[in-house]
Image (tube, rainbow, N blue to C red):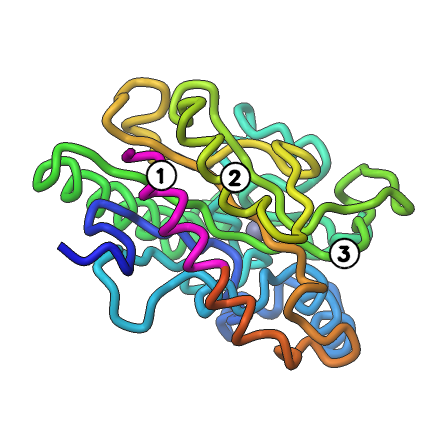
Amino acid sequence: MSRSGYPPWVVLHIPHDSTFIPDQVRPQFLLSEQDLALELQRMTDHFTHALFAEPSGEATVIRAPVSRLVVDVERFADDAMEPMAARGMGAVYQVTSQLAPLRRLLQPEEREALMREWYRPHHERLEWSVASAVDRHGRCLVIDCHSFPGTALPYEDADPFGARPDICIGTDPFHTSDALGQAFIAAFGCDSWRVTVNEPFAGALVPASRYRKDPRVAAVMVEVKRDLYLDRSNFCPDRHFDLIATEVKRRCVEAISAWQG
Ligand SMILES: [Zn+2]
């Protein structure tokens, strides 16, 4: 079997690269067109699909169909379980990255409609693809694929002048074995990239039905600093994009291969 790409039991979870806001959701937002465009620029994990996914590979790609401003599929559905909900950024954001009001107050049924339309179908696809990998291959690795801005946004509650790594690897105490975590740290840390673990972003997403229950489901998060590939002036891919996209995929595949021995 070829080792040049992802194995077929890999699921690439891409929660934040969409900028799509459905027409029926737009009136909820309190921002002007210009401010909404700016917020999308700040909050979108631009081009993470192109960074992580092979054009025709064996991994399953589960990509959120709407912007995280519509619903954030990376957050727990239940605000009581979601730490960011206290900051107004649970699955349905109330505030912007600047901690300013983002949307009008929703009725419970309006929040439920967003969850029904966009959140739950995404998680059903994720659950199904993980179940399918476990059924067919006895295992699954979910790679949670993100990027982050070179300067911390106010909502992060981080030091805005703090140095940011090039790559942040997120781990889960149950789903990320030491060997898996180390393989990703080593693959991304060689050459000149600076890698941190669970800082500034922590954890790795696993479908709810397997969370801290099923050891056949492994998970790791990879966060790429946007300054490596994105032009800060227009949020378009810069001249390094193709090289970085090739490297991100290559290093993920190399990490998986090293983890497997
Ligand atoms: Zn993200």
Q: Position of residue 205 (x, y in %)?
A: 44, 37
Magenta-tinted stretch: 248-261
Question: Residue at image x 72%, y 36%?
Answer: 87
Kind of residue at badge 3: Gly
Question: Disc 3 vs disc 2: Cβ atoms closer than 8 Å?
Answer: no
Q: Position of residue 65 (x, y in %)?
A: 41, 64
The residue that label 1 is drawn on is 258
Question: Disc 2 vs disc 1: Cβ atoms closer than 8 Å?
Answer: yes
**Secondary-structure class at tag 2:** helix
234 horizontally vs 8: left or right = right
Image quadrant occupied by the C terminus: top left
Label whose residue precedes the other's in the sequence (2 or 1): 2
Helix, strand or loop for the magenta stretch, by majority:
helix
The residue that label 3 is drawn on is 150
Residue 255 is one of the magenta-drawn residues:
yes
Location of residue 225 with respect to 178 vertically, above or below: below
Question: Residue at image x 69%, y 40%?
Answer: 88
